[in-house]
Image (cartoon, helix red, strand yellow):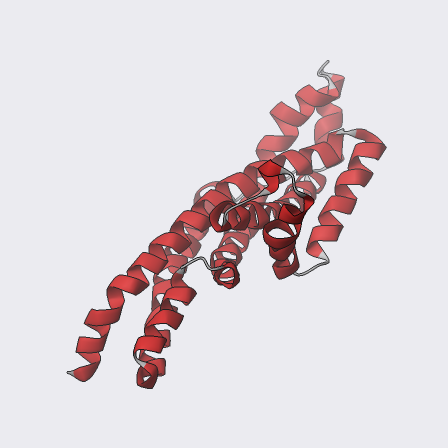
Amino acid sequence: MNEIKILEAVMPFLLEGLWMTFKISLITILCGSVLGFVVGILRMVGGWAISTTLGLYIHALRGTPFLVHLYIIYFVLPTTGISWLQLEAFPAAVIALSLYTSTYVAEIVRAAIEAVPRGQSEAARSTGMTYLQSMWYIVLPQALKLMIPPMGGIYVIIIKGTSIVSVIGIAELVRAGEHATQRHPKELMLIYGMTALLYFAYCYPVLRLARWAETKFGSVRLPS
């Protein structure tokens, strides 16, 4: 009975934290996916200079911890004195996570495009299509299907990665759990167990949706 009373007391805080996690992750996934898709496409069609520059952007962000990116955007950039770089915690977290997400999405896009046999675009070009037309009408529709399976895994990683933004004071799910343990220090197992269960309740449908999308749209036979 004591556990039930404690859960009744802490669940409003945990659900509020879950809602914040949902908002941050949803905005991040949308913005990061759009940016990553653009970066991935530009790496393939933008020429050597653009491809090299974007490659450096991707490797710089993927080769450094996300926490460093968050600190730079939230703590370092405001010291420049530029007004539009004075960010609150929420937009700073969204921007940092979106940039981080975009690097992984960009690599998925690039790999999927490269997986489509070159003969597909060559055949399209032989019919009179331009390079961009063959990319848009022939290569990308096939590549999109190849992107679906890895995208689901990346999105779940990003959802769990939102826990890091608690270090700049955002009351997401983990932060809410920490606050709850301060109120009930003897119930660490119960509170953190419920926190993990809420993460699972959020992530599992995403994985199932990704699996459904892979089965529905992601099975593609690429002719050699």
- Does residue 174 sit above or below 202 in this rendering? below
Residue at 75 percent across and 18 percent down: it is 126
Of 7 and 126, the residue lying toward us: 7
Which picture quadrant has residue 33?
A: top right
Residue at the limit of the structure toward the bottom, as seen here:
186
- Relative to 156, is 51 above or below? above
**Is residue 28 left or right of 195 when viewed as pictured?**
right
State the residue at coordinates (56%, 36%): 34
x and y, in percent, of residue 145 in the image? 55, 40
In the rendered view of the protein, which quadrant contains the N terminus? bottom left
Query: Residue lying farthest left?
Result: 1
217 up-or-down from 12: above or below: above
Between residues 78 and 196, which one lies in front from this camera angle? 78
Residue in the image at 62% along x and 32% along y: 140
- Residue 149: percent from left, percent from top: 53, 50
Q: Residue at x 37, y 65 (%)?
A: 176
Q: Is residue 148 left or right of residue 100?
A: left
Q: Is residue 215 visible?
A: no
Left or right: where 179 falls relative to 156 = left
Q: Position of residue 189 (x, y in %)?
A: 35, 82
126, 68: nearer the viewer? 68
Q: Would residue 96 be visible to someone looking at this image? A: yes
Which quadrant of the figure has residue 144?
Answer: top right
Point out residue 85 in the picture as x, y percentages from the top left corner.
61, 41
Q: Residue furthest right?
A: 48
